Amino acid sequence: MGFIKTNLLKSIDWADPSKNVICYKYPMEGRQIMFGSKLTVRESQAAVFMNKGKIADVFGPGLYTLKASNIPILTQLLALPYGFKSPFVADVFFINTKQFTNQKWGTTNPITMRDPEFGSIRVRGYGSYAFQVVDPALFLKELAGTNSTYTSDDISNFLRSHLVSCISDSLAESHISALDLSANYQEFSDEMLKNAQQQFNDMGLKLTKLIIENLSFPEEVEKAIDARSSMGVMGDNMDQYVRYQSAKALTDAAKNPGAGGVGALGAGLALGEVVRESLKDNGKSAPKNAVYCPECGQANRPNAKFCSNCGKKLNAKGTCSKCGAAVPAGAKFCPECGQKQ
């Protein structure tokens, strides 16, 4: 009688001492369960009864007295073919249904995406995610099996591969350019979470959070992005951008002591040519026989009645007695030859 008493389970419960255990198989050690035994399932837990490899009844949080009415599937399995008897043998699995947070993901190899401006580029990324078990029976069937203990470490590599696959699909479907990607981390995270959710559902899991901490490009792509930003600052004027880059490169070459006197001289001549071309172009902006505004000094067409810069009315003009150039009304000297009027 003493042996029978020590091998009868009257109370079944599990207090999780760790932070990463998802599934825990209650140690039976040859003991049996009897009708009237107490089952305690704490908050953020579920208990699953299994008999002969078949999942039977699932219990949520609460205190239960085991009887035929609350273990109907198990009672039916035990009743075949010899009739149900108490005590009985069954495996009990406790499933942690809390959120497992701060799980890390990252791309082992770069992902290739097609950018509308830069063509095919490679992207690397990393971040974190959180998940929880929402269907204990399905999770036990698809992943945990009959393992005595199943932790988040056992599943992390598997889930990470699913997430990276979803990143590739999301990048292809989003059509977000490399220039706009870093400004849309939240929108991109939401899209990834939506795409990955179905795969998690098939395992009895829910992807509760997905965070992108960084998406990076190869060095040459980042330099191209920086160059495009510089063009944007200059008003997308390609002529100005070329001059700026040429002057900067030539200045750096002139400062390079390894270039020698010939290199410095060539850089100086080339820089002078850039400046000369710039001044020549600027000179072309003023039309011949221009009328200069007395208010702001803007050069206007000879027959203009109002200033194109400030809108001031242009007064009647005379001509220089020496060179014949147009002279604004009230001017004391010719703007062309300096002859006193």
Image (tube, rainbow, N blue to C red):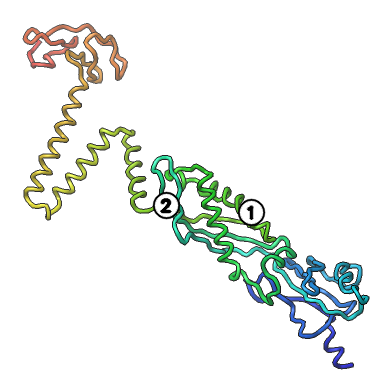
Location of mark 1 (residue): 197
In the displayed structure image, the side of residue 290 where residue 15 appears, left or right: right
**Of 182 and 109, which appears nearest the observer?**
109
Amino acid type of the residue that numbered disc 2 sits on in the rendered structure: Arg
Looking at the image, tell me whether mark 2 or mark 1 is earlier in sequence order. 2
Location of residue 63 (image quadrant): bottom right
State the CA–CA distance, disc 2 to disc 1. Answer: 25 Å
In this picture, is 130 found above or below 280? below
Q: Secondary structure at mark 2?
A: strand
Percent position (x, y) of residue 325? 13, 11
The residue sitting at 51% across, 49% down in the picture is 185
In this picture, is 29 found above or below 69? below
> On the rendered image, what quadrant is the C terminus found in?
top left
Extreme front residue here?
81
The residue sitting at 20% across, 45% down in the picture is 249
In this picture, is 173 found above or below 291? below
In the displayed structure image, the side of residue 198 where residue 251 appears, left or right: left
Location of mark 2 (residue): 122
**Of 100 and 289, which appears nearest the observer?**
100
Q: Secondary structure at mark 1?
A: helix
Is the residue under label 1 in contact with that under label 2 (CB below 8 Å)?
A: no
